Every structure is written in C-alpha cells, then in structure tokens.
Image (tube, rainbow, N blue to C red):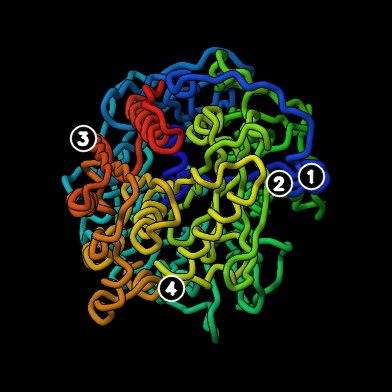
Amino acid sequence: MPSWSTVSRALVAVALVPTLALATPKRGPTPPAKAQAARATPRPSKQYTIDQFVGTTDVFGASFSPDEKRVLFSSNETGIFNVFTVPVTGGKPTQLTRSTTDGTYAVGYFPKDERILFTRDQAGNELSHLYVRTPDGKEQDLTPGDKLRASFLGWSQDASAFYVLGNERDERFMDVYRYDAKTYARTLLFQNDGGYDVGKVSPDEKWLSLEKSRTTSDSDVHLYNVATKELKHLTPHQGTALWRTATFDPASSALYLLTNEGTEFTRVVRYVLASGKVEEVEKADWDVMYTYFSRSGAWRVTGINEHGRTVIRLHDVKAGKPLALPQLPEGDISGVELARSEKRMAFYLNGDRSPSNLYVHDFGTKKTTRLTDTLNPEIDAKDLVDTEVVRFKSFDGMEIPNILYRPHQATAENKVPAIVWAHGGPGDQTYRGYVGFIQYLVNQGYVVLGVNNRGSSGYGKTFFTADDQKHGREPLQDCVEARKYLASLPYVDGSRIGILGASYGGYMVLSALAFHPDAFDVGVDAFGISNWLRTLKDIPPHWESFRQALYQEVGNPETQEEMLRAISPVFHAEKIRKPLLVIQGANDPRVPKEESDEIVQAVRKNKVPVEYLVLPDEGHGFSKKKNEAETSARIRAFLDQHLKREKATAN
C-alpha cells in the first residue's frame, strides 16, 4: 500500500501481507535519546517535497510463475495499485492489470498455467471480489454480487482446485467454497452457521481449522471434519489464552497452532490428528507471529515480533536445523513466498531508510537478486533517518516502549517541534521500518514518537490486556506521558507538540484534545472514532464473528451506554480548544463519515481552528497516490501553521 496507507493499515490492524525480518547480526544497544543529544553536529539534511516522497513506489505480494522464471506482485507505480510481473533475473516489470479507479492486488499465478488471480474492491468499500485474468488479458469476476465480500484461502495440494471465502449466503459469516481450477465450478465445503473465523484447509482436504474469539486476547480453535461435518473443540482452557491456527503440515498429520496459554508470549505447538496429543514445537522471548511450510515440507518459516521488527527463522525440516539466511542489510522481510519446487524464495526487504524491495533467493546457488528499486532516485537515503527504540515510565510506573524518529537538524541549539504518533487497533503496534509519510514529516523538521501505549501487541499478554475496558483513560494517559517524554528531550521544543493518528489512533487524538485539553498544541485525526456507541452498534456485518470480542475489549453499547458515552469525544467536544484537522474517506465502512461530520460540527462551535478534508474515492485508509500527496501536504501545512507558527504552502 502507499506510504500513508501503509501507516493507516498498520494502525487499523488490517494486515494484507505477513511481515517478517531477517535475523541479522545484532547491533549494540542504542544510546538513550538524551545521551545522543551530545553527539557531533548531525549532517545537514536536504528537504524534499511531498511529490518526491510520493514518487517512491510501493510494492508487496509475491507469486512464482509455473516455470518459476517470473514473480507476480502488486505495485502503485501507476498511481494506484495494479498487478505486475518481473523476471527472476531482473529487468523491467510488465503491467498486467490497468485499473485507474480501484486498487487491484495480486493473489498469485495458477500453479500450472499463466492465469492469475487478483482482488479488487470498489472505492475502498472493503467488499473485495476475486478475479481471474487469462493470458490474453480478459478478466472475470469469480465472486459477483453487490454486497458480497470474498477472499482467497489457498490451493488444494494437487492444484486442481482453490478455496474461496465468501459471505453471499449470510453477509455476517464467511463460508468456504471449493472452485475447480479449470471450469471455476464451485461446491460448498463448509457452511459457517456458527460465526467462526476460518483458519486453514488441510492438504488432504479432510480437515478445516476454525477459530472463535471470546475477547481480543482469549480465543479457541476447533477442528471440522469435512466428511462427517463433526466439530471438535481442540483448545479448552482456563483463564485468558490466545489460540489460533498457524498451518497444517504437508502430510495432513498435524495442525500447528499458536498459543500463549501459560506464558506471556505466543509460541508454536502442534496437535497430532491421529492421537490428539499436543506437542511443543518452537518458542522465543517474544511473540511468534506465524509459522508455515513449503509445499512438500522441506522448509518451515517462522516469524517472531522482536521489538517492532520481525525476525525470521528458516528451518531445514529434514535436517532439523536452521537454514542460513542471505546476508542483507538489517530490515524487515515481507511477503515471503517459497516456490513450489522449493528451490528458491521471493521476499521483500524493508529498512528504516529504504522502502520495500522485491528479492529472489536461490537456495542452491545461494544467489540473491534484487528485482526492484523503489525509492525515488531524487531522494538520497542518507537524508532520511533511522528509528530508535526508546522507553519511558508512565504515570503509574508501567514501562512504555516507543519508536523514535529524530530529524538530522534537531539539536539542543536548534530545537524542533514534535508529534506523538498514535497507532490503530485497538491492540496494534507501532513498528520499525520505512514509512514514507513519517519520513516526510521528519525530513521537514518534526520529531516523531510512535507510542506503543498499554494494550499494544508485541510486548506480552499482560501488557496487551492492560487496556481492556479502559479506553479513553489509562492508554490515553500513556499518550499524554509520551508528550512529557518528548518535552524532556534536549532537542525538542516542549511548547510545540502535537498528536496525530488514524482509526483508533484518530480516536486517541480526539480523546486527547477532549479529555486532556491542555496536553497537546494541535491534533490531526484520520477517520477516527468519535462515538463508540454508534461504532460498536453499527460494525460492518462481516465483522459479526468479532463483535462480542470487541464488546469485551471496549464496551457493550447495550449494557454500558453510560461508560461508552463518557469515553466518546463527540459528547465532550465542548472541551476541545486546540486546532484540529480531520481527514475522512467518504466510503469508509468501519468509521462512517457521520463520525467525522459530527465531531467537526461540534468543535467548530468552540471557535477554534478546524479543517476538514473528505476524500470521495477512499474508504478506511488511502489507496491512491494523488490522495496520499494531498493528505500529506495538507497535514504538513496544518502542522507548520500551528506548530511552526507560519503560513505554510506545504509541498
């Protein structure tokens, strides 16, 4: 997704692709931010326009062609996402789809021919359909329907069929269909009357894993027998524990699961289908995010969330030992794809000062080939900044982890304004890595602190559950303490600090201005929740399986109206006295435009500066470069006006 939508996607906990990182040699500990203030004068930084930052291309997704000579991927090179293919030896990518209105995202090649699958929604409404494109360029919607939502689940082991999730029978729940790869004839594999979240189909097509969430931190896994339609509860437990599907092994002998039962962090276990025995497989000092096998099981990939940067482990299953990884610069890998031959893998590398680039690694020759160069050549990466992990103690002594971006030009002699960046969720995390929008703000002279307030993922079960039924209170106080931390830094002007966030992060912005009206000097809210009563009552139908978990996390609008009213900024808008910029997608299905309309109307009654930008062709996040540029420029101009005390014409 584009730089801004990469941020917003992370903030709203919408993961389109798995995120991994190379296990690179560890650097020494990062000096505290205060200590770094005494370092030598930093190199002067050239400032770039937003058009130059938007000139960087965003790419993701990877699928090998049947002969493994090309890789399919998604790119916004044209200004909106389309599907491209590129030779594994390098060369100019070839554009396959040519949408000019709606983002189009690659799913993959058919395993035995040149057809491809891709998804596309309509102006950000999140009602994605699954399409097939034939080599002659013809496109066919495999999941037609006005209110239908569909997604790809996977291929059968012999590649004669593929599985699709769709809600045409009941818009609340996703059923599982089996599509014939030649004729596209489909059969219903599983009718989801129980409101489960679907996990995986076993390679032998005898089993289906299903998940049920009680809360955002407590869930179970069930096993469905396709032949008998029997359902078995695999994970009965006491107390709070997360259980979810990782993968089946290629032999369909075991279901690999992720759980934090009895521990702070998520680990890998396997349920042996024949015996029902549960065996420990893999753990780390941080959360294991996922694990999966190559087609025949030669390799197993595990991703571990280590302090906002995910580390990858690649296992040689037969040898029972780790496989050496290619030597690359430190950074994250995303979209790891193991070829069906198991001879090579495709992946993306993303560093703090380098956007994602597509690579292919050959296991036999050990050669790694970079296939894209996405940073705008007009931008010198040396003018960008590395992230820094910092911590502070909040009001009650709880330690809060953060990701800090410090401009080159910020010194004790040249103090600069700062921004607290509130992530989405609830329950997501601020990650390390390249984010073009944040680098743009930093390049223009703003310190940015991505706060991982209590309730953020990645730091253990206790920390993750510390915000339950406390939204608008303790987690918000962490953001206020983040402002105090910034003000303590010798290169930050403590009288010029704002707060910015999207989705749940936007809620944090509005809450900070309403409930702590003197804490921040300005706020920028992108599609943030202003009225929890409406949001929780009117969640999209296809979120039904998650409704009760969300109620347990935030509050039940039927039984906790008074509490939800107390933490909803729209009912306290008269307290907002600081300048506010609100950004909203007109087609947002999660936080409807009415939420932003009402908060804008209410705050304007206070005679404070309020700006409102509505994007008519976007939803919950931004997918088009033109909107990314307009939004970023508008934010910077607003911040310059109110934090730099100047009339800015941001570019």
Dot 4: few (<14), some (14–19), or many (≥20) neighbours within 10 Å?
some
Label of residue 616 in the image: 3
In primary-sequence order, the first of circles 2 and 4 is 2
Residue 13 visible in this rendered orientation of the protein: no
Q: Quadrant of residue 168?
A: bottom left
Q: Quadrant of the C terminus?
A: top left
Q: Quadrant of the N terminus?
A: top left
What's the residue type where badge 4 is placed?
Lys
Please provide percent x and percent y for residue 314: 72, 47
Please identify, in this view, whether the residue under mark 2 or under mark 1 is nearer the observer.
Answer: 2
Please provide percent x and percent y for residue 146: 16, 45
Q: Is residue 509 above or below residue 571?
A: above
Q: Nearer the viewer, residue 324 or 404?
A: 404
In primary-sequence order, the first of circles 3 and 2 is 2
Please provide percent x and percent y for residue 375: 56, 22
Distance from the alpha carbon under mark 3 to that under mark 2: 41 Å
Q: Nearer the viewer, residue 287 or 119?
A: 287
Q: Is residue 234 above or below residue 460?
A: below
- Direction from residue 262 to residue 74 in the image, left or right: left
Q: Secondary structure beneath disc 4? A: loop
- Residue placed under numbered mark 2 in the picture: 33
Distance from the alpha carbon under mark 2 to that under mark 1: 36 Å
- Residue placed under numbered mark 1 in the picture: 323
What's the residue type where badge 3 is placed?
Pro
- Residue placed under numbered mark 4 in the picture: 470
Please identify, in this view, whether the residue under mark 4 or under mark 1 is nearer the observer.
Answer: 4
- Direction from residue 183 to residue 415 in the image, left or right: right
Q: Residue furthest bottom?
A: 238
Q: Is residue 353 above or below residue 479?
A: above
Q: Quadrant of residue 84?
A: top left
